[in-house]
Amino acid sequence: MRLSLPKMLNAPLLERGAKKFRKNAVLLHGVLLSVSLIMVFPWLIAISTGLKAPGESSINRSLIPWEIALSNFSDAWRIANVPLLAFNSFIVTAASVVMILFLASLAAYGFARLTFVLKESLYLLFLAGLMLQAAAIMVPLYQVNVAFGFLDTYFALIGPYIALGLPFAILILRGFFEGLPAELEDAALIDGASRFTIYWRIMLPLTRPALATVAIFTGLGTWNDFLLPMLMTNRPHLRTMPLGLILFELEGGIGFVQHEYRFALIIMMTLPVIIVFLLLQRQFMSGLTAGAIKG
């Protein structure tokens, strides 16, 4: 006699399992929703304050403005000279990210696919740079920039950003290169391709998710950095966006801290980063999870 599936299985046990699964799913979604609200809340405060009328934030503590003042953005744009600040930040960030990606991918390819003397020792030496904090080496960096005449130039910022970003980039990219099939490289070597050709035309295009991950992390840190531009640049025409948050009141002759203008500038400073992340979101997630599954 054939038994139906419900008679073969323990129905009460399955029902309890389904209820437990639903309960865990609700709990998990509740935790994720709570964490999301905590993460989003500062951004809501920034938007709310940036839209309030000048002086309203000192008496209106709610998230809903009494009066929406879009003029805050135009005033902050004019007073802080946002086009100049954004141009400086873009030049420094773009140059640093491009050089980090090129140099780190070269080094990572060598550490992952080549065999040479002291390979692991040199790799560990590069990784030791992860323990260095920018604030701890500001004095030597300043002295080096003064000795080479780089003070008050873009090179005073780009050079340290490249040096500080290479260890993390090499760490990420080496693991990605090691996960690529060796057969691709072997076939190219048989066809007579050089090592640089294999790196540039075969291996590097396959690492786009990892490159996007490194670009977002290093670019975000460079774009938002305040300490290095503050110490290495004295000329107003070299100021970056983070410096504008502190100094634009003095340049505009306001004489006091206008929170609404400052938060409007924060929103304008953050939007490019959000746009870049949304454009590279798929590659970014692929790069983060590339080494999670082996086989």
Image (cartoon, helix red, strand yellow):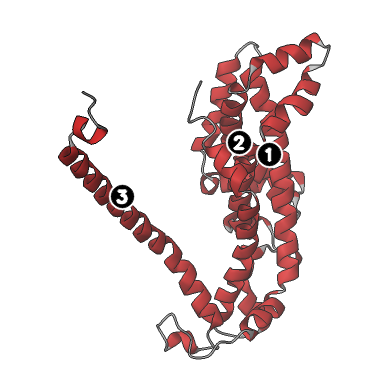
Q: Nearer the viewer, residue 179 or 221?
A: 179
Across and down, in percent, residue 52 comes to: 52, 85
Residue at mark 2: 169
Q: Is 41 rendered above or below residue 75?
A: above
Of mark 3 and mark 1, the one earlier in the sequence is 3
Whole-number angstrom distance, CA of label 3 to CA of label 2:
36 Å
Q: Nearer the viewer, residue 179 or 216?
A: 179
Q: Residue at x 42, y 89 (%)?
A: 59
Furthest residue in direction right, as rendered: 192
Indicate the secondary structure of the residue bearing disc 3. Answer: helix
Q: Earlier in the sequence, mark 3 or mark 2?
A: 3
| Residue tagged 3 | 25
Q: Are marks 1 and 2 in contact (CB under 8 Å)?
A: yes
Structural crowding at the residue carrying mark 3, measured as other residues with C-alpha within 10 Å and reported as few (<14), some (14–19) or many (≥20): few
Asked whether residue 258 is in view, the answer is no
Mark seen at residue 92: none
- Examine the rendered structure and indicate whether residue 73 appears above or below residue 19: below
Relative to 229, is 121 on the left or the right? left
The residue at the far left in this view is: 12
Question: According to the image, label 1 marks what residue?
Answer: 100
In the displayed structure image, the side of residue 162 where residue 12 appears, left or right:
left
Residue 164 in the image, given as x and y percentages of width and height: 60, 41
Residue type at mark 2: give it.
Ala
Q: Residue furthest front?
A: 1
Left or right relative to 42: residue 282: right
Residue 279, compared with residue 205, is above or below; it is below
- Image x and y of residue 112, in percent: 62, 20
Q: Could you tell me which secondary element the residue under label 2 belongs to?
A: helix
For the residue pair 287 and 269, the one nearer the viewer reads as 287
Quick one: which residue is furthest to the top in this view? 190
Task: Tell me where residue 208 appears, x and y as whole percent.
Answer: 67, 37
